[in-house]
Image: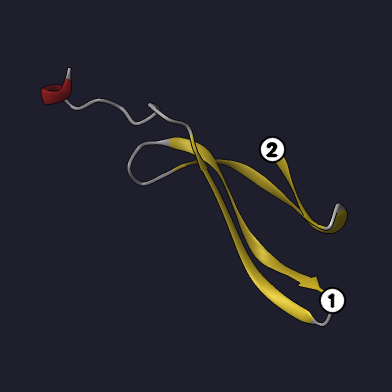
Amino acid sequence: MITVEFKQDSQLVGLMTADPKEFKTGSKGYYTMGKITIGEKRYQVQVQMVEIGSKPKTEGEK
């Protein structure tokens, strides 16, 4: 699990946790989605981190 902080002018305005995920492509990484409030406004947030080179090679790519 990875903790993601959202800051505005160095002040913490949101906090989310991203869980490990294996994407449909076979790549590995972390993903989360949710909503945070900054001031009077609400935002829908998605965080996707993909490990570079984690997608399995196909037979033709070796």
CA gap between label 2 and label 1 equals 27 Å
Nearer to the camera, 13 or 58: 13
Residue at image coords 47%, 32%: 51
Residue at image coords 84%, 57%: 9
Left/right placement of residue 59 relative to residue 9 reads: left
Checking the image for residue 15, the label placed there is none
Q: Is residue 53 above or below residue 35?
A: above
Density class for disc 1 (Cα within 10 Å; few <14, some 14-19, many ≥20) is few
Residue at image coords 79%, 72%: 37
Query: Which colour assignment does the render follow?
Result: secondary structure
Amino acid type for the residue under numbered disc 2: Met
Task: State the residue position of label 2.
Answer: 1
Badge 2 element: loop
Task: State the residue position of label 1.
Answer: 39
Residue at image coords 51%, 37%: 29
Nearer to the camera, 55 or 13: 13
Badge 1 element: loop
Seen as rendered, the residue at the extreme left is 60
Density class for disc 2 (Cα within 10 Å; few <14, some 14-19, many ≥20) is few
Q: Is residue 28 above or below residue 9?
A: above
Residue 20 location, x and y as percent?
58, 39
* Number of numbered discs: 2
- Where's the C terminus, which quadrant? top left
Residue 35 location, x and y as percent?
70, 69
Closer to the observer: label 2 or label 1?
Answer: 1
